[in-house]
Image (cartoon, rainbow, N blue to C red):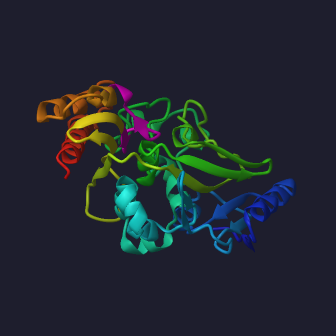
Amino acid sequence: MKTFANANARDMQHAVALAEEAHRDGRETSFAGGGSDLLAQVKDGVVAPDLLVNLKAVPALDQVVSSAGGVAVGGLITLDALGRHPEIRSRFTVLAEAAGTVATPQIRNLGTLAGNVCQRPWCWYYRNGFQCYKAGGSQCFSRAGENQLHAILGGGPSYIVHPSDTAPALVALDATFRIVGPEGERTLPAVDFFVLPRQNPARENVLGNEEVLAGVELPAPPAGLRSTYVKIMDREVWTHAVVSAAVALDMNQDECRAARIVLGGVAPVPWRVPEAEQLLVGQRITPVLARQVGEAALAQAQPLSKNAYKVPLTTEVVERAVLALATQA
């Protein structure tokens, strides 16, 4: 691990300015909130910053602020605080549940919302020095190699899966992301924040080198919103989703008025399945319909040699989540 300098940002504009100055001098920079994934990347040799821009001193970036239009959540809120926040738990349950499933209590006390959304892939080839497609090479070793945990949807030419638990929940809630960079502040829908490897092999999102995810805005939920996050892991703690589903249903008693279903652990980005969602609209949810929705969600799956098990597993997860919400009091 090479030596790097640390600079504490006073505010987000100062953080961006520090990164700009370093880049003009030919130095690599990384932004750090909780820093858990960044530290792992440095240890793995994935990144080697000359300057670490520390965001922890930036005031008010760890707050949840309510308004008539919804809720604004600062990017530096810890996952533990997010999962425990009363308003998030009551109005945006899927996000609270997703935050509460991340890693271990120790990591959730340190890791931040922005860090979880922006974390890099945990593919063993990428993290262990292979010159793979994501690392600037010309091939994805997982395609013909150890691909048990890789993508079954949206894959190619890289088959990484997006590791964030909170990202599918934010897409399901139709969140807006607030980004700060050299040109000032911009916002965009959560679904447009993430990019496939075929669009940009070097990144999983639209952030430029000197841009920071400052926070997210959640629109006020409809009165009938029910939401949940279901995650399947290969062990109890300190692991990412083998498969997961963030489901948000707008219910009028037992009839579904609108639906958003976003899959995790199966694609290089949080994977929304509008064809499956449409089956629910205007319908009374039954076990038969829930099963059809689960099957529709995976209709386009193209598993690799060792991960076909993800298809029935994800089908079951979607079915379970939809039925649980339909019967929720």
Which residue: 35% across, 56% down? 93
Residue 298 drawn at (x, y percent): 29, 30
Residue nearest the observer in this picture, 8 or 57: 57
Instruction: Report the front residue among 82 and 315.
Output: 82
Report the front residue among 190 and 307: 190
Query: Does residue 122 appear to the left or right of 242 in the view shown?
Result: right
The residue under the point 41% across, 49% down is 169
33 displayed left or right of 164: right
Q: Which residues are magenta?
A: 261-275
Specify whether 213 is left or right of 297.
Answer: right
Q: Is residue 192 magenta?
A: no
Counting from the top left corner in percent of width and height, residue 63 is at: 56, 68
Q: Is residue 46 visible?
A: no
Q: Is residue 325 visible?
A: yes
Figure quadrant of residue 17: bottom right
Which residue shows up at 59% across the image and 59% down it? 45
Determine the image quadrant of residue 261. top left
Q: Is residue 307 above or below residue 282?
A: below
Please tell me whether residue 274 belongs to the stretch shown in magenta. Answer: yes
Question: Is residue 204 shown above or below 110?
Answer: above
In the picture, the quarter occupied by the N terminus is bottom right
Q: Quadrant of residue 142?
A: top left
In the image, 69 versus 190, the foreground residue is: 69
Residue under the image location 28 percent in, 38 percent down: 307
Residue 82 x %, y %: 45, 65
Percent position of residue 23, x then y: 81, 55
Which residue of the protein is positioned furthest toward the left in this rendering? 287
